[in-house]
Image: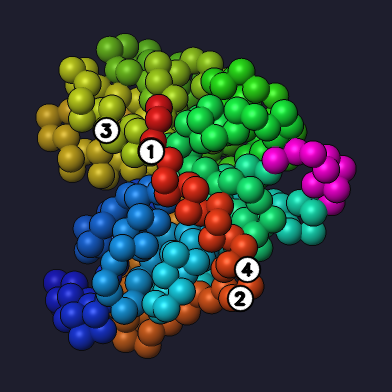
Amino acid sequence: MEIIKEIERLKKERNAVILAHNYQIPEVQDIADYVGDSLGLSIQASKTEADVIVFCGVHFMAETAKILSPEKKVLLPDPASGCPMADMITADELRKLKAEHPRAAVLCYVNTSAEVKAECDMCCTSANAVGIVADHMKDNKEIIFVPDKYLGTFVAGKTGRNFILWEGYCPTHARIMPEDIQKQKEKYPDAEVLVHPECSPALTAIADKVLSTEGMCRYAAASSKTEFIIATELGILHRMAKDNPGKKFYPASERAICPNMKRTTLEKVLWSLQDLKHEVDVPAEIIVRARKCIDGMLLSQPRH
Ligand code: CIZ
Ligand code: SF4
């Protein structure tokens, strides 16, 4: 295809790398240099030698890449690709919550703006949240966890801790209902049910395994089972099927589509490389403050 050739040519000319999240559309995943979760993408962003990072994901992920590589140009092919969950808490709201709990340590999910991260002590992804709390926050008597109340509830349960939670959630994962899983279980009784911790407790309760997207990919590859019902954003199914020929992956719900993740198209990736747009910038002072908790996130290995 002409467009793919042109993307490849411009990528070389610009010395660019294309990073794509697991929830991106198949065509975008297929032209990316690396496909992964926000932890993996952040690691790639931190060690790339490219001058330009085309980030096929949502805004907070591109901001994280910029914080890790401030000297690089970080581009978001569609500037309107936001994350409604990340938008559910502002830095002002977090400062107010901190003032109400002055002794609490603050842990944020990576799905937050750079400004919110600048207010936090630690940052986690769904792949390493349990490990960060168990290994690095043992001595913190009070912990504020923002913004995902479902991930927070899940991690609190796993670690036996009590968190001060925020009322945030992912609208895409919240659309998956327990009855969707029941229906798929009736159709595919031998399938294992893998549920993302952004789903509600009603779903994590009926899961065979609760895993981040990378955790799901690793688990499915290693499992002797051949059928899986997947309760997360549908984009992951492309990668799972591609990496595991012979195994079958069924969506828990056809409704689990993140409109923001689907905004990135091949055309927009091409335009992004042609025009060097849309650049994501983070103020220097925020970079310094947010960097500390992101560095901690990168050092903590995934634990499922
Ligand atoms: O951390 C990420 O990339 C997200 C949003 C989900 C996951 O579990 O990988
Ligand atoms: Fe945000 Fe949910 Fe979309 Fe992920 S799937 S980017 S958490 S809205």
SS label for mark 1:
loop
Residue 259: x percent and y percent?
50, 55
Give amino acid for label 2: Pro
Q: What stretch of residues is rendered in magenta?
A: 96-105
Instruction: Answer whether residue 241 is magenta in the image.
Output: no
Instruction: Give the answer, above or below, for where 60 lies relative to 254.
Output: below
Which quadrant of the structure image shows residue 56? bottom left
> Which label lies toward us, 3 or 4?
4
Q: x and y percent of residue 49 in the render?
A: 26, 72
Q: CA distance from mark 3 to mark 2?
A: 36 Å
- The CA distance from mark 4 to mark 1 is 25 Å
Disc 3: which residue:
218
Q: Select label 3 or label 2 by which is in front.
A: 2
The amino acid pointed to by label 4 is: Ile
Q: Is residue 271 left or right of residue 114?
A: left
Label whose residue precedes the other's in the sequence (1 or 3): 3
- The x and y percentages for residue 205 are 53, 16
Residue for point 45% across, 56% down: 261
Q: Is residue 39 left or right of residue 294?
A: left
Residue located at (27% from left, 74% from top): 50
- Circle 4 is placed at which residue position? 286
- Quadrant position of the C terminus in the picture: top left
Q: Is residue 104 magenta?
A: yes
In the displayed structure, 93 sits above or below 105; it is below
Gap in Å between the C-alphas at discs 1 and 3? 14 Å
Secondary structure of the residue carrying numbered label 2? loop
Q: Which residue is mark 2?
A: 283
Name the residue tied to disc 1: 301
Q: CA distance from mark 2 to mark 4?
A: 5 Å
* Amino acid type at mark 1: Gln
In the structure shown, which secondary structural element does the residue marked by tag 3 occupy? Answer: helix
